[in-house]
Image (cartoon, helix red, strand yellow):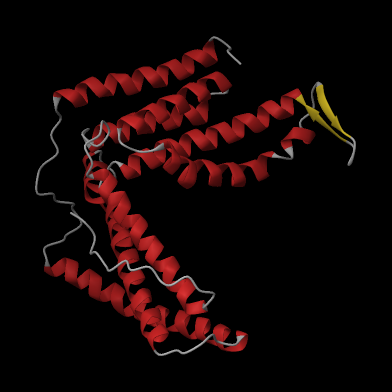
Amino acid sequence: MREPSFSHRRAPVSRHFVARLLAGLQAAMAHADDAQLTADRPGWLQRLDPRVKLIGLGALIFTAVAVHSLAALAGLLLSAVIMARLSAISLSRLLRQVWLGVLLFTGMLALPALFMVPGAPLLTLPFPPLTVTCQGLRSAALLVGRAETSATLTLLLVLTTSWPRLLKALRSLRVPRMAVMILGMTHRYIFVLLGSAMALFDARSSRMVGPLPPGERRRLAVNAAGSLLERSLYLSQEVHLAMLSRGFRGEIRLMDDLRLQKRDWRALPVFMALALAGFACQWLRLP
């Protein structure tokens, strides 16, 4: 069950304010459609029951957060890469969507640990006079490794599972109905709001000739934000009433029920073995 599709014609490459906004909105919609196409591909993770993926990948994420061994994190990240390749997800996509962004953000947070964590000196910078310690380098590597591994496993879950099946799996695992309903409404409303924003800026762009001065661009942004806020209040009621009129009562229903297959029973021990191997690296005091 896919979200409503929209026309994803690319906006012309321009410095125009409205054109850049349209290009950003269209990129967001195209990214969502591409994620749905990835979930429909024949791959190892795609063929597994979403409940098995939630339990298995959740166990691996918990292991990545809990262990203090770089060897365990490296093994879990390598396992995630292998699962991605078996699921028709390219390394370039992981690099673009996860690794670079997480490395940039987490690296900025981990950078002070190189100099602030006391320990044996490893490297001394001449200017400014700072000393990198072995313990500080290890602490920074642990922080970045945990973030990269957890984000990669989370992306695998999202890219290989359609949203309705993921919500159904959450409900099957006894996640409260209210929490699942909030997630479902939020996901659906994001697409409705994106479509409304695209229509608003597309209409504005079709009535403009030439670039806008800076003051007019700021005025346009403020007016657009106010208009979208007003529409969002109206659309939230319309979306909820439309879902109620179609029989939605908080429970996620699919055309085909979730059923565990032989491949699911074989995959679950694999996930658990990987999680236990990560803790074994910690118990063996591997670096």
Residue 256 placed where, x, y %? 9, 44
Does residue 179 appear in this view? no
Q: Residue at position x 13%, y 49% from top?
A: 254
If the image is split into quadrants, where does the N terminus sit?
bottom left
Which quadrant would residue 216 be assigned to in this image? bottom right
Image location (x, y in percent) of residue 268: 27, 23
**Residue 47 placement (x, y as % from top left):** 21, 34
The mark total stands at 0
Residue that sits furthest to the front in the current view: 13
Residue ID at (71%, 40%):
111
Compare residues 71 and 214 and report the one nearer the observer.
Answer: 214
Q: Is residue 217 left or right of residue 167?
A: right
Image side of residue 210 versus residue 9, left or right: right
In the displayed structure, would residue 157 be above or below residue 203? above
* Between 115 and 217, the one nearer to me in the picture: 217
Quarter location, residue 51:
top left
In the rendered view of the protein, which quadrant contains the C terminus? top right
Residue 201 visible, this orientation: yes
Q: Residue furthest top?
A: 284
Q: Residue at x 54, y 19 (%)?
A: 71
Q: Is residue 60 above or below residue 234?
A: above
**Looking at the image, is 13 positioned above or below residue 188?**
below
Residue 141: image location, x then y, percent: 63, 30
